Amino acid sequence: MKQTILVTGGTGFIGSHTTVELINAGYDVVIVDNLSNSNANVIDGIEQITGVRPVFYHADCCDLDAMDKIFSAHPIKGIIHFAASKAVGESVQKPLLYYKNNIVSLVNLLELMPKHDVKGIIFSSSCTVYGQPDPENLPVTESAPIKPAESPYGNTKQINEEIIRDDINSGAPIKAILLRYFNPIGSHPTAIIGELPNGVPMNLIPFVTQTAIGIREQLKVFGNDYDTPDGTCIRDYIYVVDLAKAHVKAMQRVLDMDTPQLEVFNVGTGRGVSTKEIIDAFEKATGVKLNWAYAPRRAGDIEKVWANPDKANNVLGWTADTSLEDTLKSAWNWQLKLRERGIQ
Ligand code: UD1
């Protein structure tokens, strides 16, 4: 029998791609999203890609009663919890909003899991928990020290990891996997779903594609005096479809295998790529010239971080196998598709 998975934040960027991969892998999916940063028409896109329409609830995970009813209505066995506020700058302005949204929603889910016999939860964490790793810890492994958070957003990721750990240590009859994402980019190969930033993008790749298509005049590269080979920051950019597939592996592990109650995996490629290298790779992959210039450093930026993904490769049985070139092409195709649809 098919297992039912609740995907919170399932109309968002990573949530929608993960829903597609869950459906492809044979799961039934129930999506809950408050649509604060996404659109319900993403459900149409998921149906177009997979031929299956996931159940959708316009609801907020902070609403315990609404969530209780959803758990009562479906035989949910596992949860993938994406629903969260994620803008670093905004979290500094509105910390309470971030603490409420991101923490209350998780606590509600953990409270409801035993009541409704939900076995497992996969939590969207972030490499932000490592801060700037010390040089001897690069590429970063899961056992690298957790650094004090740079923002309320980052703090909610750390606190949520601790909440899950404390809940399991207290004897909660659940299993959990924390996935620490590096920098998810790109869009589905069909260009039917993708990343839709609200207003001026803060993240690099949407800014690159919007500049390339003429929505933004110029990309500013924040800082060229970092201690890196070309002076620009280094990140581990991972294709969102590869990342989505890591969730399917994690869900199978949590539900069907005899594994530890709590596990943590880095989800990255293991390849550190500089901002300048992204620009060069984008121009090469798409043949489009970018208007860009160096600008001062962005406050709070990490100089360099990339993953050691050995644990995910060997234990989870997952690897990020899409090339950077194909990933950047997919981001560009999505931007072209948005223009066709008259969205941006
Ligand atoms: C940022 C957040 C991180 C969060 C992640 C979610 C910060 C400091 N970190 O990560 O906590 O988990 O988003 O997606 O905000 N860049 C430019 N010009 C631009 C935009 C970005 O040069 O217009 C550079 C940045 O300086 C950085 C790299 O591109 O070196 C990647 O930036 P971004 O996409 O914002 O991701 P992170 O900073 O890694």
Image (cartoon, rainbow, N blue to C red):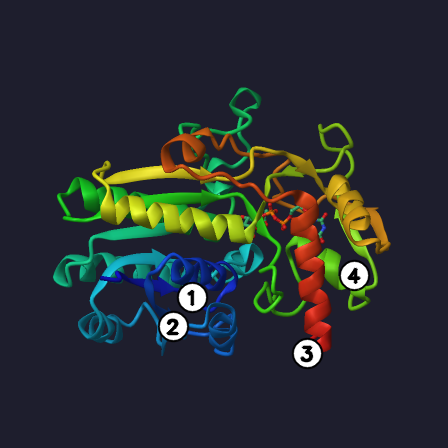
Residue for badge 4: 211
- Label 4 or label 2, whichever lies nearer to me, is 2
Q: Amino acid at mark 3?
A: Arg
Q: Which mark is first along the chain, 1 or 3?
A: 1
Q: Nearer the viewer, mark 1 or mark 4?
A: 1
- What is the crowding at mark 4: few (fewer than 14 residues within 10 Å), some, or many (at least 20)? some
Q: What is the x, y in percent for residue 305?
A: 58, 34
Determine whether, in the image, residue 323 is placed left or right of residue 156: right
Give how far apart the Cα atoms at labels 3 and 1 are: 22 Å
Q: Which residue is mark 2?
A: 54
Q: Position of residue 91 (x, y in %)?
A: 50, 58
- Residue that badge 1 annotates: 10
Q: How many angstroms separate mark 3 from mark 2 (CA)?
A: 23 Å
Whichever of labels 1 and 4 marks the residue nearer the N terminus, that label is 1
The Cα atoms of the two marked residues, 4 and 2, are separated by 34 Å
Q: Nearer the viewer, residue 197 or 72?
A: 72
Which label's residue is closer to the chain start, 4 or 3?
4
The residue nearer to you, when weighing 181 against 61, is: 181
Q: Are marks 2 and 1 in contact (CB under 8 Å)?
A: yes
Q: Secondary structure at mark 2?
A: loop
The label shown at residue 187 is none
Q: Quadrant of residue 194?
A: bottom right
The residue labelled by disc 3 is 341
Type of the residue with mark 4: Thr
Location of residue 286 by image quarter? bottom right
Q: How many marks?
A: 4
Q: Quadrant of the N terminus?
A: bottom left
Q: Amino acid at mark 2?
A: Pro
Binning the other alpha carbons within 10 Å of mark 1 as few (below 14), some (14 to 19) or many (20 upward) gives: many
